[in-house]
Amino acid sequence: MSTHNKKEPKKMNKTEFIAFMTDHGHTSYKTLTKAEAEKALNLVLDSVISAIKSHHNINITGFGSFEIHHRKAREGRNPKTGAKMKIDAYNQPTFRAGRKMKEACN
């Protein structure tokens, strides 16, 4: 019998997440102001984007990894008309959850 919590997750935007960081986060970080938390979050997000843009994969043990997956050019179809179309090759950023993250979800 599964013991997974089937409760629907609540969506949180960036502003709500910053408030969550300062109100409900780890006790050693509760001294952060919302402005400091926003600055820290922006630094992390901008750094991840810069690293991915520079073709670096990022692995944060326990949390997860951000990687780039190359997608080859292929033929697709326009969903409205069914007409064939060429889809160019591109790099797809992906996130893969680490063990601590997976355990926190279950």
Image: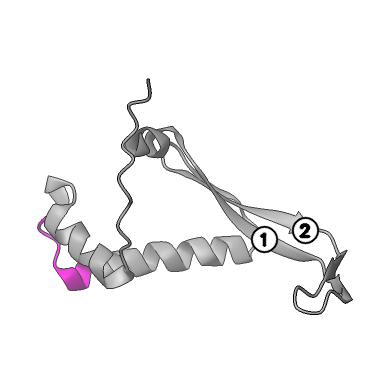
Q: As drawn, is 67 to the left or to the right of 16?
A: right
Q: Say whether residue 31 is magenta.
A: yes
* Residue tagged 1: 92
Q: Residues within 10 Å of mark 2 (few under 14, many from 20)?
A: few
The magenta region covers: 30-37
Instruction: Establish if 87 lies above or below 106.
Output: below
Viewer-closest of 51 and 105: 105
Residue in the image at 71% along x and 62% along y: 91
What is the secondary structure assignment of the residue under circle 2?
Answer: strand
Viewer-closest of 3 and 87: 3
Q: Say whether residue 34 is magenta.
A: yes
Residue 74 lies in quadrant: bottom right
Which image quarter is the C terminus in? top left
Q: Earlier in the sequence, mark 2 or mark 1?
A: 2
Give the farthest residue toward the top: 1
Percent coordinates x, y for residue 44 in the rendering: 39, 62
Q: Residues within 10 Å of mark 1 (few under 14, many from 20)?
A: few
Instruction: Establish if 37 lies above or below 60.
Output: below
Residue in the image at 36% along x and 39% along y: 105
Q: CA distance from mark 2 to mark 1?
A: 7 Å
Q: As drawn, is 66 to the left or to the right of 102?
A: right
Residue 40 lies in quadrant: bottom left
* Residue tagged 2: 71
Say if mark 2 contacts mark 1, CB within 8 Å. Answer: yes
What is the secondary structure assignment of the residue under circle 1?
Answer: strand
Tell me if residue 37 can be seen.
no
Under mark 1, the amino acid is Gln
Query: On residue 26, which mark appears?
Result: none
